[in-house]
Image: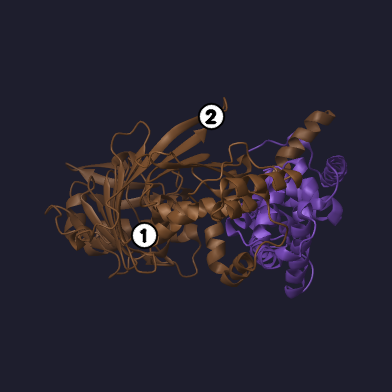
Chain colours: A purple, B brown
Amino acid sequence: MNLNSETKFVQAAQNGHLESFGALYRRYHSSMIALAYSILADRDLAEDAAQEVFAIACRDIGSLKSKERFAAWLAGICRNVSRQMLRANKGKPVAVGDNPAAQKRNDMEERREAIRRAVWQLRSAEREPIVLRYYDNLPYEQISQILDISVQAVNGRLIRAKRKIAEYLKRNGLTGDDYEPY
Amino acid sequence: MNHTENDKWLDEALSDAIGSEKSRADFEAWKQKHPEAVEMLTSRAARGPSASKSPLSIRIMIMKSPITKLAAAAVIIVAVMLSINLWDKSIPTAYALEQTIQASHSVRYLHIKDFKKGREEPKEFWLEFNEQGGVKNIRAYMPEWDSPSDGAKVVIWQQGKAKIWFKKKKSLLTIREKRFADNMLAVVQLFDPKLAVQRFSEMEKHGLAKIEIEEPSKKSEPITVTATYLPETAGLGLLSDRTVLFVDQATKLVISLESYHLAEGGDYELMGWTEFYDYNQRIDPAVFVLDDLPSDVIQIDQTIQDIGLEQGNLSDEEIAVKVVREFYEALIEKDHAKAGRLFEGIPATRIEEMFKDLKIVRIISIGEPNPHPSPGVGGFMVPCKLEIEKDGIKSVYEPYGPGVRQVYGQPNRWGIHGGVK
């Protein structure tokens, strides 16, 4: 689906064509979960948030003026919904690694936790592209539409974020030298 | 470690740590959960387009009007002056899609054969509609090629209850399950000619399809309506890239429908075709009853008994393991009635017969459930090791499966399904 066809779906959905909204839902479902996950740090909550995002979008799509900015508009709803959920859950994101069940984790899970901690210590402008990219291997172009920044800016943020993650991991004794993919 | 290697391990590590098994974007389920939002969006259709009419919708207006050739020419000239890009082949005809929609409203009975290229045996449907045009009764015959593991099936759907006769498995399953009913109706809707025509109209209205109509001067020849979907409609879940309807000139009813796929070279290749018979010829009510079953068919009615185990607070994986454990424990204790309840509701006598050659001594181990490898089946395969005894000799047996999944129509219950060997 290119931007031109997406605009057609948005227009059709604004005119009440439910299946066109369905096409948009299928296109952005996973990325909205990822964006919510970057804020909430909880996959289940993120899935709930994404459901609510599309409910709001479905009700309010008529208010969207710039059809070509649908993704960015949807992302704005997603951030609001996720922050509301955070407030409802009283406070900060579910702290990565705070789970008592983590005590028994094996090496592999410990390493995953360390990487997640490294991601969630980033500021949101860097965390969002990282989670969008690695949650479901989203292409740069789609990340740029969702974050409403250029593809070059996406690339720049990803490079900076990965550098910070690598530094964080190095400080915590984890480097690529001992990394073996499972 | 150089920069590229550094990037590679970090990419892999990030994918591993925050990557997700792609969660299914189930729009149908979302619609069910958000009826108010759906209602708000669809009500916008009734209020009319928010923006100016597309060239396509203008064309519909032209088609609807009983205009003369002269008037049509005038409209086209005005359209050109307004830079409206009408298609080259756009010739105003007397026929309009609405005529077929109108004619189809009075259809109460219909017999459909759906052929797939390269398959001899068609799927076959007998449909009875209610006065509002909704589906009342369905009989469907699904050939073996549609689902080789199930084999050929006869399905009767009435009042929210489905009876499925698995011919190869010699079993009749009765279920009341909304998802099954929705799937069945969705299949039927793909072939329902009035819905196909409505879909054409909707798609054209929203600029997502190009419709070409040819109306031969010979009245004995059918009108052809060709709907070519724009490439970007791939996300709409349509099953073809082009659909051609053949419409009877006298009755305005659809005689047949052809589905085409856009091949890499840019040509449209025929994938299959659907033939419509016996419009409004009353179907004998006996067609919607399954009373001619062979005597060796096992009848399992899941609408009158609880199948499997209730999930309670257990995770999906935990309940899958529990089901398998209790199933084999029941077999060890020769509690065939319980084993049957855990395995789709199969009668105790049949369970006894199925497992008569398998003397299980004990369960050695039950492993971690793995997602079922066949797409669409759902649930898990739960590997396990059993100690069995044959002719006084004990050995270790690792059965295929067993498959465990949620029970159709019984929310929060999990049971064994086919594939235990």
Which mark is on residue B415? 1
Residue B212 visible in this rendered orientation of the protein: yes
Residue A46 in which image quadrant? bottom right
Q: Secondary structure at mark 1?
A: strand
Image point (36%, 59%), residue name: B415
The mark lying in front, picked from 1 and 2, is 2
> Considering only order in the chain, which callout, 2 or 1, is on the residue closer to the N terminus?
2
The amino acid type, in three-letter code, at marker 2 is Ala
Image location (x, y in percent) of residue B286 = 18, 61
Q: Is residue A138 above or below residue A48?
A: above
- Residue pushed farthest top? B265
Image location (x, y in percent) of residue B397 = 31, 42
Q: Secondary structure at mark 2?
A: loop
Residue B20 visible in this rendered orientation of the protein: no
Quick one: label 1, few (<14), some, or many (20+) residues within 10 Å?
Answer: many
> Which residue is the site of mark 2?
B263
